[in-house]
Amino acid sequence: MRLQQPMLFHSTVRKELARSFGASLVVLVTIVMTMTLIRTLGLASRGSVNPEEVLMVMGYAVLGYLPTILTLSLFIAIVGTLSRMYRDSEMVIWFSAGRGLSAFVRPLFGFAWPVLLVIATLSLAIWPWANQQTQELKNRYGSRGDLERVAPGQFQESANGRRVFFLDKDTPDNKSGKNIFISSVEKDKETVTSARLSNGQRLENSLTGEGLRISEFEQHGTRVDGAKLAVPSEDSPIKTRTTLRLIREPSAVNQGELAWRLGMALAALNFVILAVTVSSVNPRIGRSGNLVFALFAFIVYFNLLNLGQSWIAGGRAGFASFMLLLHGGTFALAALWLAKQHNNWTLGPRLRRLRGRAA
């Protein structure tokens, strides 16, 4: 019976953790995908990304959010599972059987270590790769030629920003048009050209005060810019740089980004221990009290992580000192809190004894 007790204990905890983690992950991924889709459609409407590549951009964005989603899902799963065990008095049964609160750490890490490994991989490798792919899609779409920008029924700006095209719709499928409008500013002249692809008129307004000139034509030709070849830049955005490059080039900005990526993995590790400590709930109090506190702790931790990135990048904090203070301090605080709950340490009796001695 003594040999079967730990196996039964571990399997019971892991099964409920798996159910809770799966449900939390599905809900959070659905919410993030909906928000990302709305944001990506907004970028497509402003001409920042190709409308045909919306799903690809959204997929890369969701990959970037996955470390945070997995960490929050794991945190909610542990807090929710242990809180339910407290409310249903299952904790009393396990404590009576000789299972202390610290005994939950081993089965929790036994369940969480694959998730922690995935979070570390996503933060250190997949995050910069996804950002790089998104940036390449934006650069490729932004470097397209003027002819590629023209679409029936839409105002489109040229690559240099000096010319605006509009082609009227001609067919229900919006694949062709006949009435064209071009507005451009070149050499101190503002020119407006409108035509039915053959006969049209051209209006030139001098910006230096020389007057207005109107001309008509049967055929008209205009020069448009072709597609530009996207040349990779050494000064790439910080989020697209590989983790190996951040380590090899230890500038302040690179160290700030590296602290954020490593911090994601360390934060997920600390949240496993924090979840055990914040899961204790009094059945007489509302069920959602500890969950609200847990979410508050999660938000504060990640805000400190983002704040530390800006501090390190701005030279106001050192990389090693910040990592030790935030993550090492959080781990020490969580471990001390866990030891207090496991051993039932209380300050009340000790304070009363100290007061008695002083009296």
Image (spheres, grey):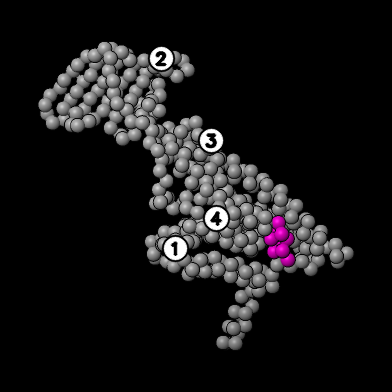
From the top left corner, tell me how far across and down residue 143 is, in percent: 39, 36
Query: Considering the image in quadrants, where does the N terminus appear?
Result: bottom right
| Tag 2 near tag 3, CB within 8 Å | no
Label 2 – label 3 distance at C-alpha: 29 Å
Taking the image as shown, residue 319 lies to the left or right of residue 14, namely left
Residue extent of the magenta highlight: 103-111
The one of 341 and 2 positioned closer to us in this rendering: 2
Instruction: Name the residue beneath numbered marker 4.
Output: 124
The earlier-in-sequence mark between 4 and 3 is 3
For disc 2, the neighbor class at 10 Å (few under 14, some 14 to 19, many from 20) is some
Label 4 – label 1 distance at C-alpha: 16 Å
Label 4, secondary structure: give it. Answer: helix
Tell me which amino acid carries mark 4: Leu
Instruction: Say the numbered circle drawn on residue 250.
Output: 1
Query: Considering the image in quadrants, where does the C terminus appear?
Result: bottom right
Magenta span: chief secondary structure: helix
For disc 4, the neighbor class at 10 Å (few under 14, some 14 to 19, many from 20) is some
Tell me which amino acid carries mark 3: Leu
Instruction: Name the residue beneath numbered marker 3.
Output: 55
Tell me which amino acid carries mark 2: Asp
